[in-house]
Image (cartoon, rainbow, N blue to C red):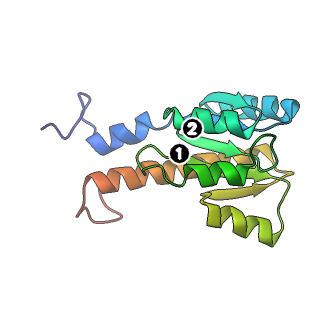
Amino acid sequence: MRTTTCDGHPRAVADLWRNLVARILIAEDDPDLCLLLRLVVSRAGHEVVGVEDGVAALQRIRGGDIDLVVLDNQMPRMTGLEVLGECSDMDAESKPIFLMLTALATRKDIRAAYVAGVDDFLAKPFSREELVDRIQQLLDEAALEGSLAASPGRPLGRGL
């Protein structure tokens, strides 16, 4: 089994590079904000799809081709929390990363989002830079966890 790529990089590094371009779903019912989010995230180098309600978001997530979901909580037909609840039974391999982006940002709302399974939370209004940074941080963490899981016993902090 080859542990390096054709250009000599360790396989884990190649896997991290492959994860730089993610398939991101924007679930936001405000069409103008959805368009803005799609532009910001696509300019950061990712493939982006937008939907305007929770049912469409859930259908797309269940399709299995989404790496990360930027999820509003207040959407028609199904809220973001309901989408998270429906995704709770997904296996870890096919479940995307969830970033909730919502105006509902009291302590109770934030706690409910984390209990429902969100990976990170960002309150509206937000800065474009913070959104892109949070997305990249979540993707980097997932890629690192994936490479560490693929090679148990590797000492942390060395050889990554």
> Camera-side residue: 127 or 118?
118
Q: Is residue 149 above or below residue 26?
A: below
Dot placed on the residue nearer the N-terminal end, 1 or 2: 2
User: Which mark's residue is nearer the viewer, 1 or 2?
Assistant: 2
Q: In this view, does 16 lie above or below 110?
A: above
Disc 1 packing (10 Å; few <14; some 14–19; many ≥20): many
Residue drawn at (15%, 37%) of the image = 2
> Camera-side residue: 140 or 63?
63
Q: Is residue 26 left or right of residue 124?
A: left
Q: Is residue 85 above or below residue 7?
A: below
Percent coordinates x, y for residue 47 in the rendering = 59, 27
Residue farthest along the left direction in this orientation? 1
Residue drawn at (50%, 49%) of the image = 140
Disc 2 packing (10 Å; few <14; some 14–19; many ≥20): many
Q: Between marks 1 and 2, how big is the CA–CA gap? A: 7 Å
Instruction: Identify the mark at residue 6; answer none if there is no mark.
Output: none
Q: Which amino acid does label 2 sit on?
A: Ile
Percent coordinates x, y for residue 159 in the rendering = 29, 55
In which image quadrant can residue 28 be found? top right
Residue drawn at (45%, 38%) of the image = 19
Could you tell me which secondary element the residue under label 2 belongs to? helix
Residue carrying label 1: 96
Q: Is residue 22 left or right of residue 85?
A: left
Percent coordinates x, y for residue 103 in the rendering = 85, 54
Q: In this view, does 80 lie to the left or right of 58?
A: right
Q: Looking at the image, can residue 125 be seen?
A: yes
Residue drawn at (12%, 38%) of the image = 1
Could you tell me which secondary element the residue under label 1 belongs to? loop
In which image quadrant can residue 7 be found? top left
Residues at circles 1 and 2 in contact by the CB criterion of under 8 Å:
yes
Instruction: Identify the mark at residue 61; answer none if there is no mark.
Output: 2
> Camera-side residue: 146 or 49?
49
